[in-house]
Image (cartoon, rainbow, N blue to C red):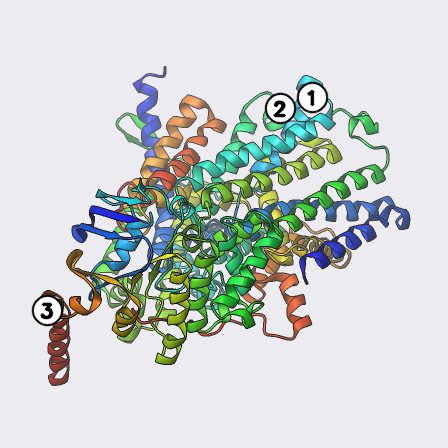
Amino acid sequence: MNQANKLLMLIVVFGLIALAPMLITQESLLNIVIMTLYAALLGQAWNILGGYGGQVSFGHAAYFGTGAYAVAVLQVQFGINPWLGLVVGGFAAAAVGAFIGFCTFRYGLRGSYFALVTLAFAEVLRILSNSVDFTGAGVGLLIPLERSAANFQFASKEGFFWVIWAMTFAAFLTVWKIGNSRFGAQLMAVRDNEDAARALGVDAFRVKMGAIMLSGFFAGLAGVFYAQYFLYLDPHIAYGAAISVESLLVPIIGGMGTLFGPLLGAAFLHGLSELSRAVIGDAPGISLVLYGVLLVVMVLFVPRGLAGLASHLRSGKPAESRVEEGKGHA
Amino acid sequence: MPDSAIIIPSVLNGLTTGGLYALVALGLTLIYGVLHIINFAHGALLMLGLYAVYFLNVQFGIDPYLALLIVPPAMFALGYALQRGIIGRASHGRDENILLVTLGLSIIIENLSLYFFRSDTRTVDTPYSFDVVEIFGAFLPYPKVVAFVGALVTAALLWLLMSHTDLGRAIRALAKERKGAQLVGINADHVFAMSFGLGVACLGVAACLLLPSYYVNPQVGGGFVLIAFTIVVLGGMGSFVGALIGGLIIGVVEALGGLFLGESLGQIGIFLIFILVLIFRPNGLFGAKA
Amino acid sequence: MLEINALCKSFGGVQASQSVTMTVPQGGITSLIGPNGAGKTTLFALITGFHTPDSGSVRFLGQDITCLPPEAIATRGMIRTFQTVQPFAGQTVRENIAVGAHLKIRGRTEALAKAEDVARQVGLGDRLDMDAGSLTVAGRKRLEVARALATDPKMILFDEVLAGLNPSEIRDVIPVINTIRDAGVTILLIEHVMQAVMSLSDYTWVLNQGAIIAEGPPREVVSDPHVIEAYLGKGMAERIAKREAASA
């Protein structure tokens, strides 16, 4: 699929999703759509850094939590409007991304080491938010209920739907643009072979910094949305490992480094957890067991995700079309 | 400023905790040193070991220290099977993939435990649970002192195994020169799985020594994962002595951090050490091997 | 154009570069030869910023570029290729070359168009949409050349672009290199294929054990006794090793 067709398809898909509030009258069903879009946003945020940039992060909660706490703290402690908090949350998360990126990329941390350090950063933030007063420490923060659109608290789910629809659409358009720009070409070059990219004049550090800040920004937006949707935050929700896992699971299942992967992954995951709830009931941990199994199965057998599987089936070519590694004699 | 009457017991207490940490880290560093993979499921496997010790005690009245004869071999078998069946096939040339697969395994193990054992925190009752030992005027819990000694013994045994047995030689050969070792007839898949099994067996030992002074719930492993990584990184990946010293350092840092900053904030020191060491000294403070 | 002055580098006690001094004039093709392990690739890595020298300096177009990072050196117009070809596997040939084109071109469409032009120039015009990872060795070598060329460089450092190719493939690639030279790009190449060194280069430097041992026009250099010794010594060692292996 070429870039123009991808854009067209993106517009069509989000156009169809936009019909949801008209077709779905049940609030609980609309809630599933909202949570799927939210997961797609979080997954797409991770995908920018992990899928397009090849930097696997285990600590995306650091950005999510920063966005969430930014909007909550500004409201609760300073009485600042959450719409302004939305902007601040996004940029604060991007700033955290810049800090973590600077600390890691500057010293050439890659692969598993990068993953573990990002996890450690998220843990540091979790402990900090658990220890200081203005985040409500371990008790958490309750955002006071004041239902009005001006206050980013909608009386019906439909209002939240449009907000998350717009944010997710924006994230997907951004990623489409990445796939169709110099920045994206350089980012993917760094992912596939950093030395070769640098030899061609790609400033790998700058490119990775760009990716981690963009990634942090969108994960921060997801955090802001979460805070406004549920009106409650604590260190475990905001900076806990669950968010980090969800944000990497979505694109890995859907297809890392693909535009539609996070949407496929989010839909698949939420579909699956609804199904398991219907079949097995609300047993604690069972849907997470399925998530774990999926993660293992995808990495083992479908490393290119659902999107890779789809294009593989369409083209009829083998998914792994690697010719035997040719070696020149030295 | 707390005076030495508080600091010395705190340091000693930290050292014994550090011994426990070192025990957990020994398995991790063995696995890393040989397979060059980071086992993210390490904490979850420890939790599984703790449950095994717990149920042996509650159902069959087997003393946790006696369980040393049962749990480590069982954990060895589990580790062998995991490496052979799942982890060894996962890399596709990228080490992050192993991290992801072991993350998946830890999610599965933790949540299955949650499903079967519920989230209750459980402890065992042994005659010696509340015994204390006096050292330098400080009263230390008897089980923690035993665990500390156990860590030293385990490290020594591992060292003997690696340096004086055929298996140890095969493991070292494989760790150093994968292709060459395979050429001289070492079955790499088997030896890798043996190494992984040994690493997990260390967790079995840790579980037996840990439970009398600790507790178990489905989340208990998570707290150990990053701590164990920190120790392994600090001590130099693959170094047993490094893991011991690293464990002790982390134990003391945690104890003093808790003393000066409070229980909650005290933990932050560990993660800061982890981040700083990985950034500035990725080969560890003691390890020189790249 | 390129002036290397007393460049030294050692790795853990092994001198990979011992005070290497050499120059490459603007235009034409200069070659760098030497037996295996002579330090040629290390020298390339030192020049292009992948390693930092212990001492000495590298000047390019009259400016000091010692210790600059690789991307800064590439931006100044000096591009290297790799001995073991390093395609961005999973991306198409067109996308691979476009990465090079993007050094000077911001727009995606323009960069892709430039990539197509360059691909035709090096004979990859029929494989534009192929996955770069599935190219043959010869194809990958061409891709390596194409990516470098797409950056619009002033100078290219080729690290054994002909190694691993069969004689007919070599015959195909040599004109490509000549065309690049004719377009005004200065070329420095590391090469093992002597026939190619003879037919391509105007001037040759010989490196042995990290030090320059001879320089001059290729035909004169290959008859230099120092050079013969450097190569023959290695040949002798090989022969002895073979005899031992046979008797064992």
Q: Is residue B23 left or right of residue C132?
A: left
Q: Is residue B108 left or right of residue B91?
A: right
Element marked by disc 1: helix
Q: Chain of mark 2?
A: A
In the image, residue A55 sits, relative to residue B5, either above or below, namely below
Where is residue B285? Give x, y as percent.
29, 40
Quadrant for the C terminus of chain A, please: bottom left
Q: Are labels 2 and 1 on one chain? A: yes
Which residue carries the number 3 mark? C229
Q: Residues within 10 Å of mark 2 (few under 14, many from 20)?
A: some
Element marked by disc 3: helix
In the image, residue A311 sits, relative to residue A222, either above or below, namely below
The residue under the point 56% across, 54% down is C111
Q: Are labels 1 and 3 on one chain? A: no
Between disc 2 and disc 1, the foreground one is 1
Q: Are marks 2 and 1 in contact (CB under 8 Å)?
A: yes
In the image, residue B8 sits, relative to residue B208, either above or below, namely above
**How far is the residue under mark 1 from the one under mark 3?**
81 Å
**How far is the residue under mark 2 from the one under mark 1?**
10 Å
Question: Callout 3, which amino acid?
Answer: Glu
Quadrant for the N terminus of chain A, please: bottom right
In the image, residue B11 sits, relative to residue A302, either above or below, namely above
Which residue carries the number 2 mark? A136
| Label total for image | 3
Looking at marks 2 and 1 on the same chain, the residue that comes earlier in the sequence is marked by: 1
Which residue carries the number 1 mark? A76
